[in-house]
Every structure is written in structure tokens, then in C-alpha cells.
Image (spheres, helix red, strand yellow):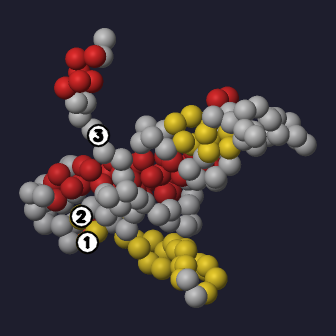
Amino acid sequence: MALRCESRAGVFRSCGETAVGVCHYCNRPFCARHGAPALEGEWTCFRSRCQMKATVIGVALASRRRAQLRNAEGLCGASPCGGRAPQTCCSLCGGAFCVAHLNAGTFRVLISRPDEPPRYRRERHYLCDECAEVIARYRLITLPPIPTEAASPRVVEPTEYERVSSP
């Protein structure tokens, strides 16, 4: 039996159409009207919480890419920086930044261990200007987990056969 869309079509009922994907964040099936594949290839439904998570993670991954290019040269990850040496890493994107481009904040962090139930703990974290802006925009008090480089999608060059056969 095919999965059915679980998005709300009214106050008391679900959409019920045949699902085309399962949301990467809430793990609920959705139809073509209630979700779409994200740019990174992950399926995301149109629920506001899932869209917010996709936006935050997209900004953090983009910030990480830009910061890594500058960090490879030994510079601060912020593009307008005058070449100060990086001192601390952003807790969200992982790029290295000088103290002029870092913001401190206290956030809830999910702690999960195999031998005990998951719980939250408040921790002090440092965020770069770009990540701090998106966190403030969505008023987040819990930092989302950001995929590592090994888990993040990569651009794959087409093979010679795909180049020749494409129109």
C-alpha cells in the first residue's frame, strides 16, 4: 500500500493524496502539493518548522564553504575582514573567524547517549555573523545539527556518456 500525504487539508483531516516523498526533518510523507526536493537533494515538506530547519542548514553550509576558502589561506572566514588571523570556530558552520566576527550566545543542545534518555543542556556557543543572523531571524534557542562534509551532498561531474547523450 502506498504512503499517503499527512499534511493538513483542513482542521480535522489530512490531505490523503499519494505521497511523493518523506520529509528529511519530520519524517512524514507528503504529496507534490505539500513538499519538494531541496537543493541539496533532501526531501522537505512545506511545514513551517521543516522549511525553517532547511533554511538554517542551507545558510550554515553556504557559510562553511565561504569560510573554508578564506581559512585555507590563513584568513578570517568573514569576507569583509581585513585579513585578521582566525581564532575561534563558529559552532554552527564550523568556519574559523576572528573575534570581531563572532557572537556569543547560550543555546540548548540535545545530549543523547545510548545508555540514558535524550535531554537538553544549556551551553555557551560562538556563532559567526551570518549564522547569528539566521538564528536571530528564526529566534532559535536550540542549535540544529549540521551535516559533516562526509554526509553533505557533493557535485558530481557527468561522465562522458552522459555529456554525449544529453540534449
Mark 3 neighbour class, 10 Å CA radius: few under 14, some 14 to 19, many 20 or more:
few
Which residue position is annotated with label 2? 97
Q: In percent of the image, x 10 and y 62: which residue is there?
A: 74
Q: Report the Cα–Cα distance between label 3 and label 2.
A: 26 Å
Front-most of residues 143 and 145: 145
Q: Is residue 34 above or below residue 133?
A: above
Number of disc labels: 3
Q: In percent of the image, x 42 and y 42: which residue is there?
A: 40
Q: Report the Cα–Cα distance between label 2 and label 1.
A: 6 Å
In the image, taking residue 146 as reference, residue 88 lies left or right, namely left
Element type where label 3 sits in the image: loop
Q: In percent of the image, x 28 and y 69: which residue is there?
A: 89
Rendering coords of residue 56 (x, y %) = 47, 51
- Regarding residue 29, the answer to whether it shows in the image is yes
Q: Label 2 amino acid?
A: Phe
Quadrant placement of the C terminus: top left
Front-most of residues 75 and 116: 116
In the image, taking residue 1 as reference, residue 117 lies left or right, namely left
Rendering coords of residue 69 (x, y %) = 17, 51
- Regarding residue 78, the answer to whether it shows in the image is no
Mark 2 neighbour class, 10 Å CA radius: few under 14, some 14 to 19, many 20 or more:
many
Q: Nearer the viewer, mark 1 or mark 3?
A: 3
Which residue is at the far top? Answer: 167
Q: Is residue 155 above or below residue 135?
A: above
Q: In percent of the image, x 68 and y 44: which residue is there?
A: 29
Element type where label 2 sits in the image: strand
Which residue position is annotated with label 3? 155
In the image, taking residue 149 as reference, residue 13 lies left or right, namely right
Quadrant in which residue 165 is drawn: top left
Which residue position is annotated with label 1? 88
Tell whether label 1 touches label 2 (CB within 8 Å). yes
Rendering coords of residue 70 (x, y %) = 16, 54
